[in-house]
Image: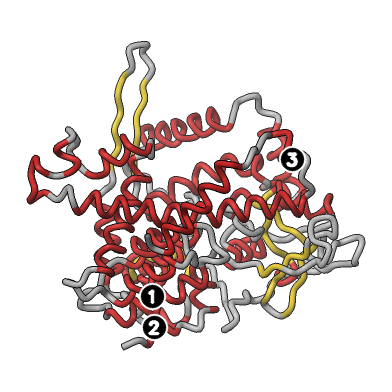
Amino acid sequence: MTNATEAVMAATSVLSEATVTAASVAAFDDASLVALQSAVSMHRRALDAVASLAAGEIARRSRRDLGHAGLAQSRGFRSAEEFIQSVSGASRIEAGKLVHVGSMMIATDSAYHSPPAWHALLASALKRGGASVDAVESILRGLGEPDSSITPPQLRAAAEQLLVESLTLNVDQLYRRARLLRDELDQNGIVRREKERRDLRYFRIFRRIDGMVGGSFLLDQEDGALFTSAIDAALSPRRGGPRFVDAAANAEAAKLLADPRTNDQLAADTLMEMIRLAVDADPGTVFGYRRPAVRVIVTEDSIGRRGSGTLEGMPDPVSFGTVERHLCDTGAIGLFFDDDGRCLNVGRDQRLFTERQRIGMAVRDGGCLFPECERPPSHCEAHHINQWLRDAGRTDLNDGVLLCRFHHLLLHNNGWAIERTGAKYTLVPPRAVDAEQCAVNLVSRSAVVQTLRNARPVLVGA
């Protein structure tokens, strides 16, 4: 019996013997409750590591070349994933993750193969409990495989960096971070991946038996950015928008706040109004005067057809050809960043942040800065680090950050605080949450700022 299996068996024994009820958990103080959650998570990582090994071995014994003699096939299942779903009750996605990671772990232990260095690194982290199955699978998917532009040493360096970052990122953030590193390493592949995503687009409609019309769609990030920008513009007053606009626009927003329609109904009506305007328009009409704004962000080193750009609110880069087309079609708003990722201060000595300042914050922060919050800029409000009345705070861009309404209220009502040192922002919890009030670094979700702030050790790999 291996050490890993012994540890899992011991953990399972302890958990099975423990009597945990809602009443017993409710009796825990805050520290004990957090400790319980941490302990269970640690044991779960160990169990998941063994589950992935088992899934990988099931997949090996269910290979296509074995035909109906394969483990899964002999029991009436078409694939190892289907068999694992039946045995474990896992979802299709969960079973796929277990097989993917487990197969990688088995390959690294095989005497007949020389495993890729980054696979061995990830398998080692999984075995010793330094990473979860979900984290390893996110890194594997995000980084992909080597090709003519990416060498194995570069992928290993990237995987090593991501394992460190996995300690502070959730699996979705980790996957996006891995994708960003891959794109930084493989600038030439951005055009190819952009086309691959566009080729996946579709729009389907159907008529239901009750006469209603439904459908589904999938858009690439360029068209998706335009579409979501249009819908967000219509719904922004319900998502924090009024705090960013002047008094006249605020009055208009108040009308929308009082509108009895739901957000989903407003979105549907907005879409149909756009379609009616397009259908009814004169064929000679040139659109663009009031089109929704999709901001294209490029850093200085991308000028001259080098590198790539990003669309505000979208995680993946776009090719410089796409950047040039947007700049030609809609013009550009100049947003300048220093080497620290700090946006040029265009603030004014006034109470409300201006629209230009709000644009700067959106590009710099990429959404709500509160740890693990996924709200995009359109759902956020501007927070003064130094409060306007209490601290005589100035409405300067560097002293304002984006927070969603929930976390904005949390800071003002529950004693949390945000501090700034240069371009670095930290979150200080109240003593009721952390007696030591240890500051937590706030990380921008903006791809362009992450690129500027990275030391980029993987970009110079062999």
Disc 2 marks a residue whose amino acid type is: Leu
Q: Quadrant of residue 366?
A: bottom right
Q: Which residue is mark 3?
A: 251
Q: How many marks?
A: 3
Q: Toward which corner of the image does residue 400 lie, by quadrant? A: bottom right
**228 and 148: which one is in front?**
148
- Residue 412 left/right relative to 161: right
- The C terminus, quarter of image: bottom left
Q: Nearer the viewer, residue 456 or 347?
A: 456
Q: Earlier in the sequence, mark 1 or mark 3?
A: 1
Q: Is residue 205 visible?
A: yes
What's the residue at 85%, 67% (across, down)? 393
Where, quadrant-wise, is the N terminus in this rendering? bottom left
Q: Where 425 sits versus 289, above or below?
A: below
Residue at horizontal 26 percent and vertical 39 percent from the top:
83
Reading the image, the residue beneath label 1 is 184
User: In this rendering, does residue 308 appear at all?
Assistant: no
Q: Position of residue 450 (x, y in %)?
A: 52, 72
Q: Is residue 431 above or below residue 282?
A: below
Residue 359 placement (x, y as % from top left): 60, 62
How packed mark 2 is, by other alpha carbons closer than 10 Å (few <14, some 14-19, many 20 or more), is some
Residue at mark 1 to residue at mark 3: CA–CA distance? 44 Å
Under circle 3, the secondary element is helix
Residue 75 horizontal side relative to residue 28, left or right: left
Which is closer to the viewer, label 1 or label 3? 1
Q: Residue 340: x, y in percent?
A: 60, 81
